[in-house]
Image (cartoon, rainbow, N blue to C red):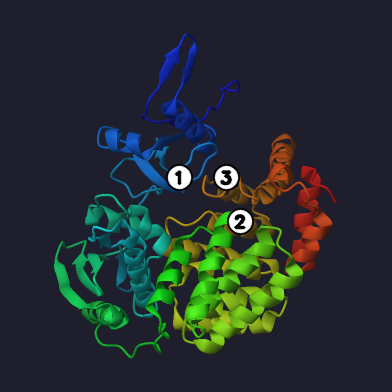
Amino acid sequence: EDQRFEVRIGINLGEVIVEGDDRYGEGVNVASRLQQLAEPGGICVSEKVSKEVRQKLAFAFEPMGEQRVKNIAEPIYCYRVNLQLPRAAPVGRLTSLELPDRPSIAVLPFTNMSNDPEQETFVDGLTEDLITDLSRCAGLFVIARNSTFAYKGRPVDVRLAARDLGVRYVVEGSARRAAGRVRINAQLIDAVGGDHIWAERYDSSLEDIFAVQDEVTAKIVEALVGRLAGQPARKRPTSLEAYDLCVRARGVSFQTGLGAREARMLLEKAIGLDPDYAEAHSLLALNLWLGWLFWNEPKETNQPRALAEAQRAVALDPNDAGNRWLLGIILGHERRFRESDAEFEATFKLDPNHADAWAMRSDLITLRGDAVKGVEFVKRALRLNPHPPGWYYWMAGQAYYALGDYQSAVDALRKPETYRTTSRRILAAALAQLGRLDEARQEAEFFLMSDPYFSIRHWATSQPFDDEEVLQRFVEGYRKAGLPD
């Protein structure tokens, strides 16, 4: 047992060329990259493999989303094989999620019924907007976009999807956009009882699309919780072209410098068409903020512009929670904590289901010295978004580390969704605090490969700490792991 080796396994279906002892080809290349994505002792498979074997094996296949890997042109959609979890159980958990104490709902990605694949982004935008509008209803528990879009492009058993996400109700539908018109079919299903509660077809001019979105939202809310005094309406764009550009920008990954630059170009064009389009200003603020945080863009120019764009978005539409939480983040990183708190309070009053805001609130509250609340907030975010982006686990690991629960920090930061990101520095520190110095130093070395200019001193001055004890706990861990002062 002491001599046991843990291996990583990647499996793909594809062409393999055999020449003597050599094996190469597309099948081998992809399998090799999947192996690198697997956890130690884990198995990562391509979507092709999952489709072939998932009904024949009593294991759960947990979606990892699209992954961009070296020397492969297109992203690979892949799955992690859970060898201990039966196939019938919800993805990624040993037990079912308990249903919330209020009506719970997930909106699955609408199907694009147009012959034009270019309309895929438009249809995704409709789904995203419906999730956002339902999320603003305090009487509902609404699953976040990232989790429901894990089902995009695949046949879905509504009952299993509802069980996986921990909800009772599911919305599914389709949309077709052509010749200046849009046709939308939507239905609300009770996934527990199997009943269709509500269904409707809308055929309208494209100019009326936002009115249709509002009606669909109102019908679903009325069916589940009755007529409520709703939140003040979000301000809609006046230009459909600007809306299209903004939706395209939403779909561009901000996780790479190239993607961020493409999104920025789209957003600036949208603002040029509709200067009062609040969401475009808000997304541009996020883009600029991430630019100096992750892509080595100049803080001196990006920071004030990001703040100005975020303030402009709130001034244009104070009733959009997406605008308020983003301003809260930027103010928090400027150590304007009271103003930041006010923006987050406004966010959750407008949208209590905003998973990203809960996760980011965890980040700021942890660095200010309240790691107990940090853990509480990120757990709330994970319940609203059971298949989250990797940075949620980064926030969880950070909060556990600040709390002194180093093993829980390691468990969170070794999740495949966040492992191999710059969160590795916290993983290295947690391992060091546990006395696992060889592992800690190896993780520190890996981290420095991706961030060779990191220094503890620069990091400490750039983070919005408001608690010296928490700051020194991180500094101590980094030094133990061998990160440079």
Relative to 324, residue 368 above or below: above
Instruction: State the residue in front, 84 or 61.
Output: 61
Q: Residue at x 25, y 32 (%)?
A: 56
Residue contact between numbered discs 3 and 2, judged by CB atoms under 8 Å: no
Residue contact between numbered discs 1 and 3, judged by CB atoms under 8 Å: no
Q: Looking at the figure, which quarter contains the N terminus?
A: top right
Instruction: State the residue in front, 253 or 391.
Output: 253
* Residue at disc 2, secondary structure: helix
Relative to 297, residue 156 above or below: above
What residue does disc 1 label?
75
Query: Of marks 3 and 2, which one's residue comes earlier in the chain?
Result: 2
Q: CA distance from mark 1 to mark 3?
A: 22 Å
Q: CA distance from mark 1 to mark 2?
A: 16 Å
- Residue 414: image tag: 3
Residue 30 position in % (x across, y down):
46, 32
Q: Residue at x 45, y 61 (%)?
A: 251
Residue 120 position in % (x across, y down):
33, 60
- Residue 257: image tag: 2
Left/right placement of residue 155 relative to residue 329 reads: left
- Residue 397: image tag: none
User: To which quarter of the image does residue 462 belong?
Assistant: bottom right
**Amino acid type for the residue under numbered disc 1:** Pro
| Mark 1 or 3, closer to the camera | 1
